Amino acid sequence: MTTSTPERETPGTPERETPGTPARETTDSATSRLTGQSRSLLAGPDRGRVNRNALRGRPRLYTSYAGDSALLNTPAKRWWTLAVILLALVLPFWLTRDLSHLLSVAMVMAIAGIGLNLLTGYAGQISLGHPFFMALGAYTGAVVAGEPGSIVIGWELDLGIALVLAAVVPGLVGLVVAPLATRVRGLYLAVLTLGLLMLGEQVFKQWASVTGGSGVGRAGALPVLFGNDLEQTYAVGPLLIEPHVSLYLLCLVLLVALAVAARNLARSRTGRAFAAVRDRDIAAEIMGVNLLRTKTLAFVLSSAYAGVAGCLYAILIGRVAPEQWNILFAINLLAIVVIGGVATISGTLIGAAFVVLLPRLLEWLAPWLPFVSTGSGGLITIFQLESILFGALIVLFLILEPRGLFGLWHRIRTYFTTWPFSY
Amino acid sequence: MSAPLLRAEGVSLRFGGNVALDDVSFEVRPGELFAIIGPNGAGKTSTFNCISGVYRPQAGEITFREESVLGQRPDRIASRGIARTFQNIELFDNLTVLENLLLGRHHVMRAPWWKAMAWLPGTSREEYAARLEIEYLIEFLDLTAVRRHPVGILPYGIKKRIELGRALAMQPELLLLDEPVAGMNAEETEDMARFILDIRSELGLAMIMVEHDMRLVMDLADRVMVIDFGRRIALGTPQEVQRDPAVIAAYLGGATDDVLESVREELS
Ligand SMILES: Nc1ncnc2c1ncn2[C@@H]1O[C@H](COP(=O)(O)OP(=O)(O)OP(=O)(O)O)[C@@H](O)[C@H]1O
Ligand SMILES: [Mg+2]
């Protein structure tokens, strides 16, 4: 007889109060009875904090749950983040106008990529319709804060308002589409969102008063933020802030804010629910996760992120035509998520930089690549090489490292920190 | 006697022509450990699925605390206080042990997404409170060493424990355990039995346990229900049930008298 003999006492009355009351709050120490731990350490004003002196030289010991679950929970992460942000702030003053513009585009694509990653990476709902929501954001911004033209309408309001509405309108459209999108999954969802993309393209082509019409397009919102025209050069102390620098800084601020918000969401109750729905939806439901609400939220948030990105994208590019929100754009966005790493925000930043900067890098390298033609001769054009590389990278990452560049970096880091041990 | 916590009455469930449950009735009292046993395919897991809202029986009624659960979504039933584990482990493989357990707190937590995005004080307070609860469970279930590991890479026995922890994190009033020791060795089984006993004595939860390990069932359960081909063939204390000829027949088909005798000895 291996199992211990149970004390066959008559089952006690349940410890719980009547249903429906906030009794759960008062019984929340129930689990503590299982271990009989003392709560006194956690009760005082310091709530389990350890004396600072005891910590000196042991930075990797967490002394509170807040420290443990913080976004930047190691000194290395804090220093790296600080360094990257400082570098990002300095770069536009140092780089050429052309390159800092390219970086701005990368940051905008990162915002869109984070939105898509929330939906596809975290909540597991694949979507090819993301450019549709970017377009909605672009046109919302253009109508609200754009210049009116002979065909197109534009109200010339402040960019601040335009950016808010560029999140709200796609979010609301997302809310309308969500009941359909949450009923299907996997391949069916991919096809459904592709349908949305094609439907959108037709609507945008016809609706000339908003989009400028097929083949023509329109300019994005005017960059007048809180009354300041960003097309002028401003002097802040010794610094000259040129138009391309102000746009860059605007993109940077929005990217940082939206990335932090997404990271916060990911480590919260909602983020866990996303992941639970992705990994096992039925089990998630039995654990108390409302499937419909969770998927809808992911869809709406992702659309809002896309909208903000679309609004900024139109401003940066200068002119957007209805044709450009197409399947190739959708694939580029998926490439950002897959190459950067599914369900990581920092990975998406890397992925966006990679996808936006790679073509430029190839252009630079082209003269040294004999098989690439820059004018005449050579086997393939630079655009073909680009498509081939993206395609190959997506396939490679999906098969070899689903966590993308982020995962690759993680592996390398683990390898070196644990060397010479293999795990 | 106090009112039953869960009451199933005449529950019938069919898949096409295949009858999974046929007019099954039982009651679970508060704080009771109620076991359901039966041969493979008898309908034990289906019973759980009816209670937790995954399947909707074609006939019959299931009430929890005098209120029907039929037609309610699984997440609603979960938040009313029914938690369960699964026969084939259903953990969220890409999440860490901590995150899996925290998911059990999902229905108690309230912070909305927009507060979470700004990590407003309400959110963080709630997260840390949940974390504290989870830490007790981690210690109780001896999972300290693997807290941060993604559950996908952990061994089977530990996964079973994590599933138990996740269900406990929900602070249910009724815990459904689907084969908690299936596939475990003697030592792991003993650990699990101890956990179940501790949960009972410390938390006073009512539990329904489906299990093929007869020794465990007969040791732990207050009452046992036996089903075969979806029909209830016996219900009573472990002693009553193991003397029941219908039960012995169900488990052994047309076995001879000596076999029955040896089985009886084995069981008692
Ligand atoms: N989703 C389903 N679709 C069709 N038939 C099902 C479904 N779920 C269960 N069944 C059938 O219902 C019957 C009871 O299955 P159930 O899983 O409840 O058995 P069980 O008692 O849990 O068996 P085991 O001991 O093998 O776990 C079986 O005949 C099974 O084939
Ligand atoms: Mg079963």
Image (spheres, coloured by chain):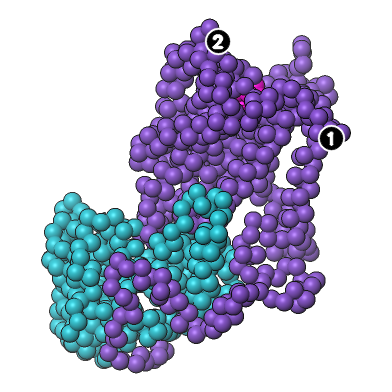
* Quadrant that contains the C terminus of chain A: bottom right
Q: Is residue A44 above or below residue A127?
A: below
Among the chains, which one is purple?
Answer: A
Question: Horizontal placement of A54 versus B144: left or right?
Answer: right
Question: Which element is circle 2 on?
Answer: loop
Chain B rendered in what hue?
A: cyan
Query: Is A222 contained in the magenta span?
Result: no
Task: In this rendered view, identify the residue nearer to me: A197 or A93.
Answer: A93
- Residue A304 visible in image: yes
Residue B245 screen position, x and y as percent: 15, 83
Q: Which residue is mark 2?
A: A149
Q: Which residue is mark 1?
A: A237
**Are the residues tagged 1 and 2 within 8 Å (C-beta)?**
no
Task: In this rendered view, identify the residue nearer to me: A400 or A97.
Answer: A97
Task: In this rendered view, identify the residue nearer to me: B13 or A167.
Answer: A167
Which of pointers 1 and 2 indicates the residue nearer the eye? Answer: 1
Looking at marks 1 and 2 on the same chain, the residue that comes earlier in the sequence is marked by 2
Q: How many marks?
A: 2
Residue ID at (77%, 39%): A89
* Quadrant that contains the N terminus of chain A: bottom left
**Three-letter code for the amino acid on which mark 2 is drawn:** Gly
Q: Is residue A8 above or below residue A28?
A: below
Residue B150 screen position, x and y as percent: 56, 61
Q: Main secondary structure of the magenta part?
A: helix
Residue ID at (38%, 34%): A177
Residue ID at (72%, 58%): A414
Task: Tell me which segment is drawn in magenta.
Answer: A312-317
Residue A88 screen position, x and y as percent: 76, 40
